[in-house]
Image (cartoon, rainbow, N blue to C red):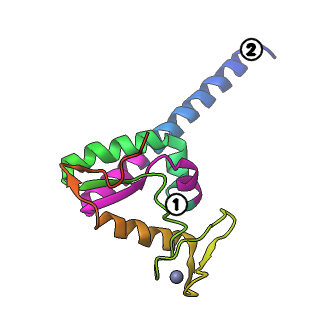
Amino acid sequence: MKGSSNRYKAKIQLAKHHAKIANLRKNTLHQVTTYLCKKHARIVVEDLNIGGMLKNHKLAQVIADCGFHEFKRQLEYKAKKFGCEIVVADRWFPSSKTCSSCGHIQDMPLKERVYNCGSCGHSMDRDLNAAINLSRLAFTVKAYGGITAPMLPTK
Ligand SMILES: [Zn+2]
């Protein structure tokens, strides 16, 4: 029945439920970003590649729920607080396309889950291969204060 008190109560219940989930997700994101900044000296984030982040990372659900920009914002201020560095890899950095073994670069359509190098024959999980390339990037860039900019976007 429209406008009945039961329907009204149900609506309030639903709103409370949504609020509870939103809070839970907020806390999860805070826990994750605090953990990352406290326990690591450098963190690499791929910029402007939200689609890729959502496909490739276990944090995808948390990030998708809370928003990538909120994730990055928290990382940046917590990095300052805990003294860790954020390395932002720009979106043109070929993390997925580069062979982590020999440096060969080849096309990697998203459906390809395993990197099979056409040059040296190296075979590795796509995400792991990309993560290795990103972690190497983190150690080759120069830090500017708390935040590092390896390759500034050419706009
Ligand atoms: Zn290779």
Question: Residue, x 43% and y 70% (percent of image)?
Answer: 133
Q: Residues within 10 Å of mark 1 (few under 14, many from 20)?
A: few
Residue 139 is covered by the magenta coloring: no
Kindly identify which residue carries mark 2. 4
Residue lying furthest right in this view?
A: 1
Residue lying furthest front in this view?
A: 154
* Spot occupied by residue 55 in the image (x, y as percentages of width and height): 59, 57
Q: Quadrant of residue 150?
A: bottom left
Q: Residues within 10 Å of mark 2 (few under 14, many from 20)?
A: few
Question: Residue, x 52% and y 32% (percent of image)?
Answer: 19
The tag earlier along the polypeptide, 2 or 1, is 2
Residue 38 is covered by the magenta coloring: yes
Residue lying furthest bottom in this view?
A: 121
Magenta stretch, overall SS: helix
Q: Magenta span covers which residues?
A: 29-55
- Work out which quarter of the rendered image holds the N terminus and state it: top right
In the shown orientation, is residue 10 left or right of residue 119? Answer: right
Kindly identify which residue carries mark 1. 57
Amino acid identity at mark 1: His
Question: Residue, x 54% and y 71% (percent of image)?
Answer: 105
Q: Quadrant of residue 71?
A: top left
